[in-house]
Image: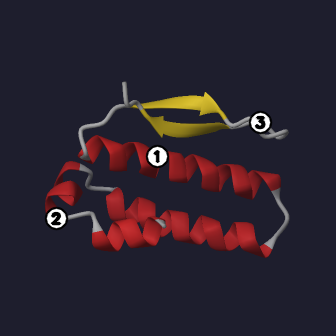
Amino acid sequence: EVRIIAGDYFKPEHAQKYPDLFNKVNGIMKLASAARQKNDLKAAQDLLAAVQEFAVIFWETKGVKTRKQPSGHTVGGELVYPVTA
């Protein structure tokens, strides 16, 4: 999903506002690869944190604020949600 959003949605003006945007996307791809290769909670947590940063940027480009909420998973963590109300 991150790769598709990066390729189909983000425009040059987004990269101007967020100059590290495509480095973040590349980092997510590498973290995802590492998480798939090993059964490592730290790798999964690093990937989740990077995707959350990406989600916040995505929603900011749409003018939508975000909030973090506990994931409800047994290992903990938070998820990013758009604020709709």
For disc 1, the marked residue is 53
Choose the circle earlier in sequence order: 2 or 3: 2
x 65%, y 74%: residue: 33
Residue 53 to residue 25: above or below:
above
Location of mark 3 (residue): 76
Identify the mark nearer the N-term, 2 or 1: 2
Q: Identify the amino acid type marked 1.
A: Glu
Q: Nearer the viewer, residue 11 or 83?
A: 83
User: Mark 1 or mark 3: which comes first in sequence?
Assistant: 1
Q: Nearer the viewer, mark 2 or mark 3?
A: 3
Q: Amino acid at mark 3?
A: Gly
Whole-number angstrom distance, CA of label 2 to CA of label 3:
36 Å
Q: Which mark is residue 12?
A: 2
Q: Give left or right: position of 27 versus 14.
A: right
SS for tag 1? helix
Mark 1 or 3, which is nearer the eye?
Answer: 3
